[in-house]
Amino acid sequence: MTSSSQLSSALSKQDFEQIADFRYQLRIFLRFSEEVTQRHGITVLQYLLLLQVKGYPGKEWATIAELAERLQSHHHGVVSLVSRCEKAELILRSAGRSDKRCVEVRLSSKGETLLNQIALLHKDQLSQLQSVLGRVYQTQVTS
C-alpha cells in the first residue's frame, strides 16, 4: 500500500499544475455546457443523450444498452432519460428491427435541430480544451 507522502513525492510541482490546469479547463467546458443547455431549455444529460445518439459510430440510432455505456450510466437511468426526451419530442424510440426486445433510439427532427444549435456553440470551447490537452500531452512526452 502506498502512503500519501510516497504518492505526493512521486509527482512534481509541474505535474500538480498540469492536473490542476486540466481540471480547471475541463470545469470551464462543463460549466459552459451546463449554461448553454439550460438556455436552450434542456439539461446537460438530455444534451449528452442527443449527442450520443447522433454520434454513435456507424449508425443513426443507438440502443438503450449502448447509450448506457456511452453515458456511463445505469440502464434504468437511461430508460428514464429517454422517456423524458421522448416526452419533450427530442427523440423517437421503436422496437429493434432484429430483436423486438431491444429499443432503438433516434433523434426527432426537433431533437436534431436542437442538437445542431447546441453542438455548434460547443465547438470553440472544445478547441480550447483540445489545446490544453495537447499541452499536457506534449509535456508528458517530453518529461
Image (cartoon, rainbow, N blue to C red):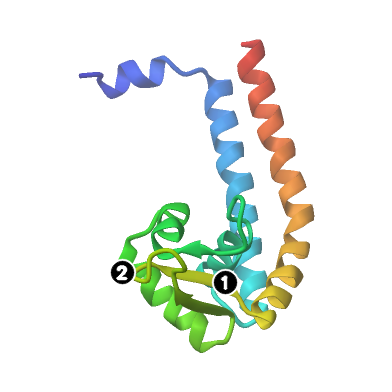
Q: Helix, strand, or loop for circle 1? A: strand
Q: Quadrant of the N terminus?
A: top left
Farthest residue toward the top?
Answer: 143
Q: Residue at x 64, y 25 (%)?
A: 137
Q: Residue at x 54, y 74 (%)?
A: 43
Residue 85: x, y in percent?
Answer: 51, 80
Q: Is residue 61 left or right of residue 71?
A: right
Q: Is residue 21 left or right of residue 1?
A: right
- Type of the residue with mark 1: Arg
Q: Is residue 50 left or right of residue 101?
A: right
Residue 76: x, y in percent?
Answer: 31, 69
Q: Residue at x 49, y 77 (%)?
A: 93
Q: How many angstroms separate mark 1 from mark 2 (CA)?
A: 18 Å
113 versus 133 height, above or below: below
Q: Residue at x 72, y 59 (%)?
A: 122
Q: Which mark is residue 26?
A: none
List the residue tagged with mark 2: 76
41 versus 13 height, above or below: below
Q: Quadrant of the C terminus?
A: top right
List the residue tagged with mark 1: 106
Tell me if mark 1 has few (under 14), some (14-19) or many (20+) residues whose alpha carbon lies within 10 angstroms of its own. many
Q: How many numbered callouts?
A: 2
- Type of the residue with mark 2: His
Quadrant of the image occupied by residue 64: bottom left
Please name which of the two marks, 1 or 2, marks the residue nearer to the observer.
1
Q: Are marks 1 and 2 in contact (CB under 8 Å)?
A: no
First-in-chain label (1 vs 2): 2
Q: Helix, strand, or loop for circle 2? A: helix
Quadrant of the image occupied by residue 141: top right
Pick the residue in front: 140 or 48.
48
